[in-house]
Amino acid sequence: ALASWHLQAMSLSSIRNDKLAAIAATACAGIATGCLTFVSAVDVRSFLSHVKNNKMDLIKDHFPIWWPCGRDLMIPVLLSGVISNIMAFRLTKHVNFAYTAALIGCIGPYTGIVLGEDIEALRKSNHEEVGETARRFCNLHHLRLVAAAAGFGLSLVALAEI
């Protein structure tokens, strides 16, 4: 048993720092993509279903609770994706990690600049404007997923090439 553990420890120690950084960066990009996939596939579809069925009060009551929770999750997820991909780029010199850091790094500002007005409107909106604002927010959200998924794909390619 001790010999087996020693062999495992030796194989782990043979993993280089650049490889570990690449693995961590790819994992962080995957987590960001997974989070945004869930929002696109579940939350956005739910919001649009409520709009279609004229359940504006449900969105009006839910969004002010939902948004801060999502924001509080995504800030550290996006920061870890950017930082880990910058570190992987510095250690590996593989440009895909820099591209991934840039793509993930654009998600936060895009959310604040492009979606910010809709977010505030949905947090404080009246019944009449909820439907249109929710549709616009949902449609604009998907670009965040595209950016994260593109970054994740680039980091997977880089990881495979290291």
Image: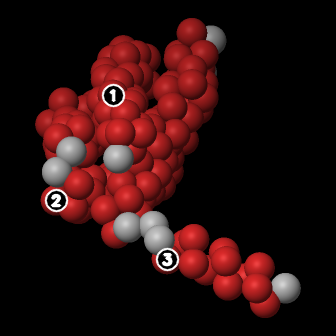
Three-letter amino acid code of the residue under disc 3: Ser
Q: Residue furthest right?
A: 1
Establish if 133 lies above or below 38: above
Q: Residues within 10 Å of mark 2 (few under 14, many from 20)?
A: some
* Residue 155 coordinates in the image, percent (x, y): 35, 40
Establish if 81 lies above or below 135: below
Residue 57 in view, yes or no: no
* Residue 98 coordinates in the image, percent (x, y): 17, 45
The front one of 103 and 60 is 103
Q: Nearer the viewer, mark 1 or mark 2?
A: 2
Q: Would you say the residues marked 2 and 3 are in contact, meaning their CB atoms lie under 8 Å apart?
A: no
Whole-angstrom CA distance, mark 1 to mark 3, is 31 Å
Q: Residues within 10 Å of mark 3 (few under 14, many from 20)?
A: few
Is label 2 in a helix, a strand or a loop?
helix
Q: Which residue lies under the disc numbered 3?
A: 13
The front one of 29 and 41 is 29
Q: Which residue lies under the disc numbered 1?
A: 150
Whole-angstrom CA distance, mark 1 to mark 2, is 20 Å
Which picture quadrant has residue 147? top left
The quadrant in which the N terminus is found is bottom right
Q: Which mark is residue 63?
A: none
Q: Would you say the residues marked 1 and 2 are in contact, meaning their CB atoms lie under 8 Å apart?
A: no
* Residue 35 coordinates in the image, percent (x, y): 50, 42
* Residue 70 coordinates in the image, percent (x, y): 45, 49
Q: Which mark is residue 90?
A: 2
Q: Nearer the viewer, mark 2 or mark 3?
A: 3
Give the mark nearest the N terminus, 2 or 3.
3
Residue drawn at point x = 36 percent, y = 54 percent: 22
The front one of 11 and 144 is 11
Residue drawn at point x = 18 percent, y = 30 percent: 114
Q: Nearer the viewer, mark 1 or mark 3?
A: 3
